[in-house]
Each structure stands twice: as C-alpha cells, then as structure tokens.
Amino acid sequence: MGRKLGLLVAMFVLCLPASAPAQDTASTALNILPSGQSEDASAPGATREAEMYNALTPLRDNITDAQLPNYFKSEALDPGNTIVRTETIPSRPGVEIRRDALDVPHIYGQTNDDVTFGAGYAIAEDRNLLLNQARFDSLTAAIDAPGPSAIDLVSNLYQFAPSKQTERIVSRQTQVLRKAGPKGVQLLHDIDTYLAGINAWYSANQPGAPPFTRNDIYALNALKGQFLGQGGGGEVDNAQFLDGLQGKFGSSKGFDTFEDLRGRDDPATETTLSKAAPWNPLPSSRKGVVGIKNGSFQSTAPKPASAARHLTPGLASNILVASGSRSTSGHPQFVGGPQISYYFPGLVEEMGLHGPSIDVRGATSAPFPGYMLIGRAENFAWTLTSADGDIIDTYAETLCGGSRLKYEYKGKCLPMQKVNAGSINKGDQKIPVVFYRTVHGSVYGYAKTTKGKTVAISRRRSSYGKDTLDQLFFQDLTYGRIHSFSDFAKSAAQTPQTFNSFYADATTAGVYTTGLLPIRPNGADSDLPTDGRGKYEWTGYLAAGGHPQGTIPNGLLVNWNNKPAPNFAASDTRFGDETMLPRSEMLLNNLQATPQHTLATVTGAMNKAATQDVRGDLFWPILKSMLDKGKAPSALAEGAEQQLQAWADQGAPRLDVDRDGNLDFAGNAIMDAAWNGLANAAMCSTLGNNLCNQLATRQSRFDSPNAHNGQYDGWYHYMAKDFSTELGTKVPQPYSRRYCGGGSVAKCSAALWKALNSTATSLAAQQGPDPSAWRESASSQMIQFAPLPLLQMDYTNRPSGIQQVISFG
C-alpha cells in the first residue's frame, strides 16, 4: 500500500508542467533586483544582481541592445535550462519549486492553490528574517499608531509586542474583504492557502515561531501602504508655517506667500498625461479651516531612543516608455520600476508563478498571497510609482467637558477611544504604545489655535481598515483577467492605496492613478487642519473615471513620481515639489534627444538621468542668467562659475568614473558646497532666517543625493520660477511677490555672487587656488544596503525594487 502510494505521488509530481504553458510574446524580457534573492550576503551569487546593477551606472547613455544582458537578467516566463536545483514539499506533492542559478524560485503547481501554497513556502524560506522582524511591527501601520513608522521600526530592529486590542482592531479587515464580493472571498481563501505554505516552512525549520495569521498579512499590507501608498497628513506643519508667514506679511499677503511656496496646482510643472484630471481644487471658502499658532504643536507619539535610521519613501521610482512612432519596432519599449530603498534583505523577491490560471513572473513581497506585485504576463507588463495622492486629512478636535480626552462632534461631547496597542521593545527599552482615537482617527498631539484654544490633532486616512483591498488588483493581474489597458484601469480602481500604475503590451502603453481619493466640501482645505465638529466631513470619493488615466499610442510616457495630470492637486506632503523643473524633465529631455528608440536607448535615457544632478542639468542655465546680470567679485568666483558651466556642458554627472574616490568634476564640489548659501541668498532676504529655516522643514533646500534621497525636493523649484520672472521670462502662474533681492535683479545677482565667492574662497583655502582642481569625495553619496550590509554601490537615482526592460511583439 505504501509503495503504491509513493508511486502515485511520484507520478503526480512528474505530471507537473515542464515549462510555462502559455506563449511568451515578449521580444525582450529582462529585469534586475539589486537586493537579490538571498538573506545571506555571503551566499554564492548573493551580490550578483547588485554587481550587475552597479556596473551600468558609469555608462550613462552609452549602451547598446547587445549589452543589455550584461546589466539585466532574463525575465522569461520559462526559465528553461537555467534551473540548477528543484525542491519538493512532502506535505504538498502538487507543488514544485525550481531554482535557477540566481536562486529565483519558479513555482509550478497542479492547481492554483498549489501555486499559492508554494509562494508562501518560498517567501518564508527566502525572507524569514524579514518576516520575523516585520510581522508585528507592521501592526502599528494597520492601526495608525502615532510614533515611528512601521518601516522605521523594522529598519531599526525594534520589535512591537501587540495587545489583544490591536489584534481585534486589525482582524476587522476580514469583514471588509467578505463584503468585497466574490473576489474578496477568493482573497481570503488565497490568504489562508498562502499562510498554510508559510507555516509549513516554519513548522519544518523554525517550529518555535508563532503561526502566521491573517492579521499578519493585513498588517504587512498596511506597512506597504504606509511606506509607499499614501499621501497627505502634513496640515499642522503647513498651518504653523502659514501662521508664521501671516505674522510677518499680514493675513492676505502671508497667505499668498504660502500658496506661492506650496505649489498646490502649478501649471508650470511637467505632467505624465496632457489630459486634465481635476480633483481637490482650492476652496472658495475656508470657514472650516482651523488656524494653528506657530510652534504650538506638541506630539503625543512615543519616541524610541535609538530609532536613528529613518526611511522615507525612496522617490526614485520611474517609468520610461517609447511607443508607436517613437520606437524602431513600432511596439512600446518599456523600462521602469519602483524605488523601495536599498534594503537587505530585500523587501521584495523575484518569483515565477505557474499554474492552470496563473503564468506570471516578477517581484512579489510578503503581503501578496501568491500574487505578483510588479512583473509581467505572457503579453503585457506592469509597474508602479508612488503617487502620494492626498488620502490623509488632519482634524482639529474641539475639546469639551473640561477634559483633553473628550471632543465635540455633531453637537455631542464624546469620549475618545483609548487604544492600549502594546509596546515597542528593543533590549532594555520597553515603550508603551497608548493613544486615543476620535471618529476621524488617531490623535497625534495637541496644539493651540491662532485664537488661543487647545485642540487635539487627529488624522483620517481613507484607506484605514481597508489596506488589504489593495490585493484585488494584483489578484486580477496574477489570475490572467487582464486583456487590455481598459481591463487594467478598471482593475486598478479597486485599490485604496495611491500609486501610478503603468501598463504596456505590444500596441499600447498607459497609466492609471489609483487611490481612494476623498471629495472635500467647500470650506475645508486639504492643505490645512479641518474643524472636526462634523460640518466639514468628506462627501464621497473621486469616481474611477475621474482619476488620471490614459494611453500613448504614439509618443513618450515618462513618470518620476511627478504629477500625473494637469489640475490634479499635489498632496500637502508634496509641499513645493510639483512646480518648475521637476526632475522628470531630465528623463524626457534624454528621451527626446533620440528620434527612434530601442530598449537600449530608453535604458540609456534612464541611466543618464540617474547619474545627473538636477541643479546642474536643469537649473544651471537659469542661475547663470541671473549671475550674468552682475559681475564676479573675484577671479576665484569667476573660475568657480566657469567650472560649473563645464560640468553642466557634460550633463552635470555625479560620477567617479576614474575610481580615484572623488567625483569627476569640480562642478560637483562647487555646487554642493555653495548650494545652501545660494538658496539662502535667493529666498531669505525676503522671508527672513527664521521662516527660511521653517520652510526647509516643509521643502528642504536640496534632497541631497545618497542611497535614499533622489533630488526630488529642493529650492531650485522656487528659484527657477522667481529668477525667470525677475529676468523677464513669462512663466505660468507667477508668484505673488519677487523673492531674490526683493525683486531687484542687481541685488539678487550680487547676493548670489557673494555666496558663490564665499564658497570659492573656502575651497581655495582647503584645496588650492585652481578651481579646476577642486574635488568632492564620492564617499558620502555611495549606496549602502541596510539594515544588513550587502555591497557598496555608486550613487544612482534609479529604481531599486525591480526594474524591467521589456517589449512585446
């Protein structure tokens, strides 16, 4: 009997498909994941993808199609003869995991459930260190606990110990999924099957670990949303800054100055689509806005003592597509991927998934129950960039009953709900996480209004309690339900998280911007705190047809986390970013330099921009025009200007090609050393030092290049518009005032020369009198993986999660 059963099992396994059953219509399919597959940096091949990724950087746009396989590996659906070992799972004979030379698991199943189970088993096998660290920390994202973000708890190796109350709150997502209809029911089934795979691995390898549950999957989805899929929530910081501006310039002019610097809906910026998508306009009344006294906000969030590493979303996700008449093949040439920081072990891993209804390959992650996050099917590919849509609003809660824990809502004095969430632990540190909630959301602190009253500050997130609905989109992608861009857009509309979602097949490339986007009533302003007493609640959500969306049958499609469409207002956390000179112009300029594209030329356009300094490439001509209105105060300053020009003439690269440990051009050293002085000279004579420093908390002077910053923020946005206006260039929606030199071109130019001269004098004292010999060490911008080391890499401003290079037809 036992022998016959063994024979039947062996025959069953032999019946597993030997290769992907579907026809792969990609003419070229390549990808790269620099974090690789392993959790052990010393394992054979663990650094191979990082080495390939790093080798592309110094080439800029000098790459041919024949060279692409040197820097990207195959993303074919069928791994063919690359398989080096095979795993079977005794408890699940319908599953086979075939590993290639880079340890990518290609999972084959007799049933779709077999594939889902295998995906859970493989994610536990390959990412158990990450799972062990993240599963409980992620719960803080699901409950919107004030304090460090979930990804910061993970990266600083804290461990959150949840309470039963936290677990009960998170478990409510089960009902949300059930109410989502047949797809939601299937999602629950797939989560349970996926968990069975995870727990099968743990049972065999780490039997002491608590079994993984649905709550762990819900929490991990919330971590993804918190880190990459939400925007907004900066209203109190905005309100305090506005109060400071109005204190200096008066109510009306102070507000105008705020709107200048905010850049909510600036027509001067570059958009991915040309068709407008009106949403979240400025209100005609602000009766529901609550002013906050500058400097009065006091946070109630716990602050771990050693949470030194703060991970912000890596705004280097980008997509470039040349399609139709701009492609030599007549088919879209697609190069793109997300930036999720240089994390090791990787937050994502590559898989191939193959079953009766499943045939996909790409990057997936722990929250995805056998679904593909970013990747490809037999005849189309997809990717994401963070959209940062404004789905979080801040409410000023009027206190009542003589208590800081009661608030007024619709005429009643209500008690806040107390949440004993658990504790944040590390070593001897044990920090209780206790906070309160109102009808709007978690209370993050208290502040004084401009009228002197104390209010509680709470935040409402539209995706709260619905994080896992995001998976309905990826269920469709994985199960072969997408057959056109129209299908893709309809499916993308299911997710409450906010991303720009991109699609390409043999004829069409397009984008759909997702998210549960609130409709605010007139009287409320999403940039500023809303009166929480109940008169200014959201009135609904933007209909799917109103979201930015569209295709480009002929032309170029570019996004680098920039504005997707005209009249689609930037979130308040993108303060001052979506205005003149978004860095996406570098991608577009590089693409436009080539009339007809191949995958290599599109990749080259991406790689060149990834190594450029936006200040030298885009902003320098405007800065030089202002400098030219004055006179260099010294030969050193004049020499510094000449070196900046020489650097800009080469496209302003930030490279150490000769490997001497220094950036190759003097312009790097001069621009970096001079920048804060130049920025202050441009803005602070009008704003004053205090407001200038406060502005830097809303929009940094420059988002300095390193492993986690992508030159997205910077006062070059402001300076470009202000200088252009002062120099007589017509700009869309000019500022309400002129900032540099108080509007005097002569004074502005003199102040900029003074700042440049100060830097030149300092550099000469340090490095000698020849400006052409000045250099800056490349070490500060080198990429270091964390929390565990993998490989040091040269600075590059490109996707790090997965980057696909693919074309169909």
Image (cartoon, rainbow, N blue to C red):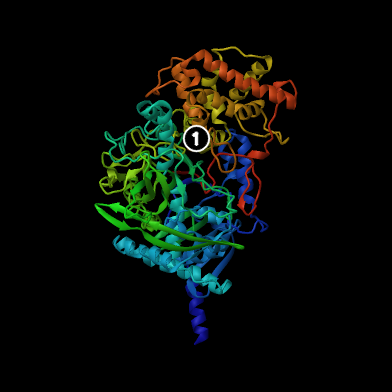
> Residue 456: image x %, image y %?
38, 50
Residue 676 horizontal side relative to residue 141, left or right:
right
> Residue 628: image x %, image y %?
56, 14
Three-letter code for the amino acid on which mark 1 is drawn: Gln
Q: On screen, 63 above or below 117?
A: above
Q: On screen, 483 above or below 571?
A: below
Residue at x-position 34% and y-position 45%: 485
**Image mark count:** 1
Give whichever of 680, 578 is nearer the camera: 680
> Residue 335: image x %, image y %?
49, 41
Q: On screen, 736 above or below 97?
A: above
Residue at x-position 70% and y-position 25%: 763
Residue on which disc 1 sits: 694
Give whichever of 145, 468 is nearer the camera: 145
Q: Secondary structure at mark 1?
A: helix
Q: On the image, which quarter does residue 553 sit in?
A: top left
